[in-house]
Image (spheres, helix red, strand yellow):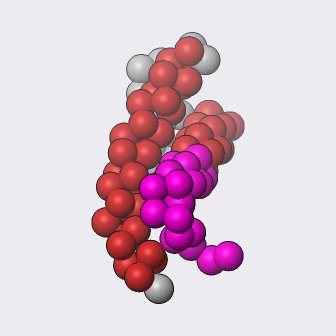
Amino acid sequence: MIAKIAYKPLGMAASVLGGIVATRLFAAAWKALGRGEDAPASTDARRSWPEVLSAAALQGAIFGLVKAATDRGGAVGFEKATGAWPGDE
């Protein structure tokens, strides 16, 4: 119980950092695919359905991967430092 409470601020900081990393990774991936500088907004009338949906799918995959990696990495690091697993066992 104490481990979960102590881990909360660290987990929030890791989430913020992960969000920044994921945003940059998505922007780089979108640009590398040759799709332009900015990903399309879902309400952009100039963009097609396939373009909007593919951007959303790529963004979701990148954000999901980064979130899982930061959550898991933070929990493993916390366990190594304290000997207690911060999540559900």
Nearest the viewer among 55 and 43 is: 55
Residue range in magenta is 67-89
Tell me which residue sits at (35%, 60%) in the image: 10
Nearest the viewer among 9 and 21 is: 9
* Residue 88 place in picture, x, y as percent: 62, 77
Nearest the viewer among 3 and 68 is: 3
Q: Is residue 60 visible?
A: no
**Residue 32 part of the magenta segment:** no
Image quadrant where residue 51 sits:
top right
**Residue 82 part of the magenta segment:** yes
Tell me which residue sits at (36%, 45%) in the image: 17
Image quadrant where residue 85 sits:
bottom right
| 72 to 39, vertically: above or below | below
Name the quadrant of the C terminus.
Answer: bottom right
* Residue 33 place in picture, x, y as percent: 61, 17
Tell me which residue sits at (41%, 61%) in the image: 11
Is the magenta region chiefly helix, strand or loop? helix
Tell me which residue sits at (45%, 77%) in the image: 4
Image quadrant where residue 6 sits:
bottom left
